[in-house]
Amino acid sequence: MSKQNIIICSDLRYDLEKVISSHKYDKLFILTDNNTFCNCLPAIESITPIQNATHITIGAGDINKTLDTLSQVWLKLSQNGATRHSLMINLGGGMVTDLGGFAAATFKRGISFINIPTTLLSMVDAAVGGKTGINFNGLKNEIGSFAPASEVIIDSEFLKTSDYENLMSGYAEMLKHGLISTTENWKELIKFDFDNDIDYKSLQSIIGKSVAIKENIVEQDPCEKGIRKALNLGHTIGHALESFALKSEHPSLHGYAVAWGIVCELYLSHVKSGFPKEILRQTVAFIKEHYGILNFSCKNYDELYELMTHDKKNESSSSVNFTLLSDIGKININQTASKEDIFESLDFYCETMG
Ligand code: GLY
């Protein structure tokens, strides 16, 4: 898989114009959803190549990450004369960059695309690393391919209009990157000040570091055969909690479920791999303060365990696969835990977070 060029930008219009002019293309397409069409496109529409681009706009939200929407995008590309030498820009959150990336990767066996993520979650996770796809048959990201954008342009200006919940949702993935990298990075993340006016310059700087951590891992293992599984920390239990919350009246944002999953999986890391107690304590305190709690009790443990056994990361249906840590940056992939261990980690969550 070729490497993506990540640009942490200070002047979006200037950087984008430069990036576009570095491509040889016949037609330019720009994909937005209803929200980014109104709220984010104005930031770039004055530059000449965008004025000449064909716009494709899809419905916002995960509910539209479907085969039907994908086929609408293919149709627009086809009807507007896209060729193998066309270029597509995906402007939006993870849904737009995932679906748009997959549309580009498959149209005429693949056209180049540029991602401009507009949410923190897509800046630090979805838009980088080359995973593209759509939901199918009720399953998230069931159809897709590894297809890197040629460039990912990250501008934290977009975050100034983000609500707190979406900011914290993306921040959970950054916290995960801190835990799988260095103590210095983790410390910087848990002391970032969200209580007063957010310092977007500092945020842009830690976003850059976070993306570099992910890129480094993806470069070593683009197709998730080995070390890329480090990026699954917090996600085995996190996905189960996300699905559980979805069925309740209080669905949670992806990053919130990941943060709660990190609480449980760091506990498992402590018990099974000797992860330091003090780092566990400080991380749990940060998550409790910034993410609150998803309420469940021991009556829900069997249902949560059942959801974990269906996780697509498992090697077999009878074991649950985890990425655990023996310290910050000391990663153990392909770990399993017994039902008793998992229930104990859920007990830990209820006792410390409740
Ligand atoms: N979101 C995890 C990965 O890109 O591998």
Image (cartoon, rainbow, N blue to C red):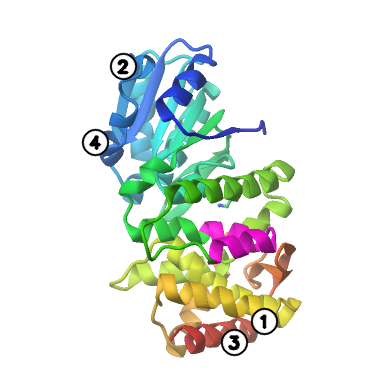
Residue topped by disc 2? 51
Residue topped by disc 3? 344
Tag in front: 1 or 3:
1
Ligand 1 within 8 angstroms of badge 3 C-beta: no
- The answer for how far apart the CA atoms under marks 1 and 4 are is 47 Å
Q: Where is residue 174 in the image (x, y as percent from the top left)?
A: 54, 57
Q: Residues within 10 Å of mark 1 (few under 14, many from 20)?
A: some
Amino acid residing under circle 1: Lys
Q: Can residue 92 be seen in this view?
A: yes
- Indicate the secondary structure of the residue bearing disc 4: helix
Q: Which mark is residue 38?
A: 4
Labelled pair 2, 3 in contact (Cβ < 8 Å): no
Amino acid residing under circle 4: Cys
Q: What stretch is highlighted in magenta?
A: 173-190
- The answer for how far apart the CA atoms under marks 1 and 3 are is 16 Å
Q: Which of the two labelled residues, at mark 2 and mark 3, occupies the earlier sequence position? A: 2
Q: Where is residue 94 in the image (x, y as percent from the top left)?
A: 43, 45
